[in-house]
Amino acid sequence: MNTRSFSCYHDQFHKELEKWKKFVKENSLPVNGIYKLTTSIPILRKGGSDIEGILYIGEGDIFGNPGSRPGLLINAINKTAPYHDAGNRYLLIKDKYPLSSLSLSIELMSNSKEVEKELLTIYKKKFGELPPLNLI
Protein backbone atom coordinates (compact mmCIF):
# COMPACT_ATOMS: atom_id res chain seq x y z
CA MET A 1 0.00 0.00 0.00
CA ASN A 2 2.54 2.58 -1.21
CA THR A 3 -0.06 4.80 -2.92
CA ARG A 4 -3.06 6.59 -1.43
CA SER A 5 -5.48 9.32 -2.47
CA PHE A 6 -6.65 11.89 0.05
CA SER A 7 -9.31 14.52 0.48
CA CYS A 8 -7.97 18.07 0.36
CA TYR A 9 -10.13 19.25 3.25
CA HIS A 10 -7.79 20.09 6.13
CA ASP A 11 -9.15 18.02 9.02
CA GLN A 12 -10.02 15.01 6.90
CA PHE A 13 -6.60 14.98 5.20
CA HIS A 14 -4.60 15.12 8.42
CA LYS A 15 -6.76 12.44 10.08
CA GLU A 16 -6.30 10.09 7.09
CA LEU A 17 -2.57 10.85 6.88
CA GLU A 18 -2.03 9.99 10.55
CA LYS A 19 -3.70 6.59 10.08
CA TRP A 20 -1.52 5.89 7.02
CA LYS A 21 1.60 7.07 8.86
CA LYS A 22 1.01 4.38 11.48
CA PHE A 23 0.61 1.71 8.77
CA VAL A 24 3.77 2.89 6.99
CA LYS A 25 5.81 2.79 10.20
CA GLU A 26 4.53 -0.68 11.14
CA ASN A 27 5.43 -2.00 7.69
CA SER A 28 8.79 -0.21 7.29
CA LEU A 29 7.76 1.56 4.07
CA PRO A 30 9.68 4.59 2.71
CA VAL A 31 8.73 7.96 4.20
CA ASN A 32 9.65 10.01 1.13
CA GLY A 33 7.51 10.18 -1.94
CA ILE A 34 5.75 11.97 -4.76
CA TYR A 35 2.52 13.86 -4.26
CA LYS A 36 0.18 15.18 -6.93
CA LEU A 37 -2.54 17.73 -6.47
CA THR A 38 -5.25 17.14 -9.06
CA THR A 39 -8.64 18.54 -9.95
CA SER A 40 -11.59 16.77 -11.53
CA ILE A 41 -11.81 19.72 -13.94
CA PRO A 42 -9.72 19.38 -17.16
CA ILE A 43 -6.98 22.02 -17.44
CA LEU A 44 -6.38 23.78 -20.74
CA ARG A 45 -2.63 23.83 -21.49
CA LYS A 46 -0.55 25.06 -24.43
CA GLY A 47 -0.25 21.50 -25.75
CA GLY A 48 -3.87 20.47 -25.21
CA SER A 49 -6.28 19.61 -22.43
CA ASP A 50 -4.91 17.90 -19.32
CA ILE A 51 -7.82 15.59 -18.53
CA GLU A 52 -5.95 14.22 -15.48
CA GLY A 53 -6.18 17.73 -14.02
CA ILE A 54 -2.65 17.83 -12.60
CA LEU A 55 -2.20 21.12 -10.76
CA TYR A 56 1.04 20.28 -8.94
CA ILE A 57 3.69 17.57 -8.72
CA GLY A 58 5.93 17.62 -5.65
CA GLU A 59 8.23 15.40 -3.66
CA GLY A 60 9.66 15.20 -0.19
CA ASP A 61 9.19 13.88 3.31
CA ILE A 62 5.58 12.69 3.46
CA PHE A 63 5.37 12.29 7.25
CA GLY A 64 7.96 14.86 8.39
CA ASN A 65 8.12 16.86 11.54
CA PRO A 66 7.30 19.61 12.13
CA GLY A 67 5.37 19.42 8.86
CA SER A 68 5.12 17.03 5.96
CA ARG A 69 5.40 18.49 2.46
CA PRO A 70 1.88 17.44 1.43
CA GLY A 71 0.56 18.53 4.82
CA LEU A 72 2.02 21.99 4.30
CA LEU A 73 0.37 22.11 0.87
CA ILE A 74 -3.02 21.17 2.33
CA ASN A 75 -2.59 23.75 5.11
CA ALA A 76 -1.89 26.49 2.56
CA ILE A 77 -4.82 25.46 0.34
CA ASN A 78 -7.13 25.62 3.36
CA LYS A 79 -5.56 28.89 4.61
CA THR A 80 -4.52 27.38 7.95
CA ALA A 81 -0.80 28.07 7.37
CA PRO A 82 0.98 29.79 4.45
CA TYR A 83 4.07 27.58 4.25
CA HIS A 84 3.85 25.99 0.80
CA ASP A 85 4.33 28.12 -2.33
CA ALA A 86 2.12 25.92 -4.54
CA GLY A 87 -0.66 26.14 -1.95
CA ASN A 88 -0.32 29.91 -1.89
CA ARG A 89 -0.46 29.99 -5.72
CA TYR A 90 -3.57 27.78 -5.62
CA LEU A 91 -5.41 30.51 -3.70
CA LEU A 92 -5.07 32.70 -6.81
CA ILE A 93 -6.98 30.15 -8.96
CA LYS A 94 -9.33 28.62 -6.36
CA ASP A 95 -12.43 30.05 -8.03
CA LYS A 96 -11.63 28.08 -11.20
CA TYR A 97 -10.70 24.89 -9.31
CA PRO A 98 -12.72 24.77 -6.07
CA LEU A 99 -11.57 22.75 -3.08
CA SER A 100 -14.39 20.27 -3.68
CA SER A 101 -12.79 19.35 -7.05
CA LEU A 102 -9.35 18.61 -5.57
CA SER A 103 -7.64 15.36 -4.62
CA LEU A 104 -4.13 14.65 -3.38
CA SER A 105 -2.41 11.38 -4.26
CA ILE A 106 0.77 10.25 -2.58
CA GLU A 107 3.14 7.49 -3.66
CA LEU A 108 5.91 6.44 -1.30
CA MET A 109 9.36 5.74 -2.76
CA SER A 110 13.01 6.19 -1.86
CA ASN A 111 14.01 7.89 -5.16
CA SER A 112 11.38 10.64 -5.12
CA LYS A 113 13.69 13.45 -6.32
CA GLU A 114 14.54 11.60 -9.53
CA VAL A 115 10.93 10.53 -10.14
CA GLU A 116 9.63 14.08 -9.58
CA LYS A 117 12.11 15.42 -12.12
CA GLU A 118 11.08 12.72 -14.62
CA LEU A 119 7.34 13.37 -14.12
CA LEU A 120 7.79 17.11 -14.62
CA THR A 121 9.86 16.50 -17.77
CA ILE A 122 7.17 14.20 -19.18
CA TYR A 123 4.43 16.71 -18.37
CA LYS A 124 6.34 19.56 -19.99
CA LYS A 125 7.01 17.52 -23.14
CA LYS A 126 3.34 16.59 -23.37
CA PHE A 127 1.79 20.01 -22.67
CA GLY A 128 4.58 22.50 -23.47
CA GLU A 129 4.64 23.83 -19.89
CA LEU A 130 4.74 22.68 -16.28
CA PRO A 131 1.62 22.04 -14.19
CA PRO A 132 -0.03 25.34 -13.21
CA LEU A 133 1.23 25.42 -9.62
CA ASN A 134 4.80 24.20 -10.34
CA LEU A 135 7.54 26.72 -11.00
CA ILE A 136 10.83 26.11 -12.79
Image (spheres, helix red, strand yellow):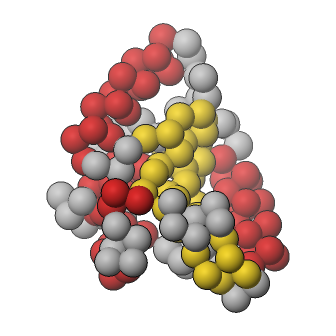
Residue 50 left/right relative to 31 = right
What quarter of the picture does the C terminus occupy? bottom right
Q: Is residue 89 visible?
A: no
Residue 77 or residue 65, whichever sits in front? 77
Residue 13: x and y in percent read 32, 40
Residue situated furthest top in the rendering: 26
Residue 45: x and y in percent read 65, 83
Residue 116 left/right relative to 60 = right
Q: Is residue 77 visible?
A: yes
What quarter of the picture does the N terminus occupy? top right
Looking at the picture, does residue 2 appear above or below residue 14?
above
Residue 127 or residue 28, whichever sits in front? 127
Q: Quadrant of residue 135?
A: bottom right
Looking at the picture, does residue 119 appear above or below residue 136?
above
Q: Quadrant of residue 88?
A: bottom left
Looking at the picture, does residue 57 appear above or below residue 124?
above
Residue situated furthest bottom in the rendering: 46
Residue 80 or residue 93, whichever sits in front? 93
Residue at image coords 20%, 64%: 79
Residue at image coords 29%, 43%: 66
Residue 120 or residue 100, whichever sits in front? 100
Residue at image coords 55%, 12%: 27
Residue 25: x and y in percent read 47, 18
Residue 26: x and y in percent read 48, 11
How many dots with numbers? 0
Residue 40 left/right relative to 95 = right
Looking at the picture, does residue 117 appear above or below residue 94?
above
Residue at image coords 58%, 64%: 54
Residue 34 left/right relative to 103 = right
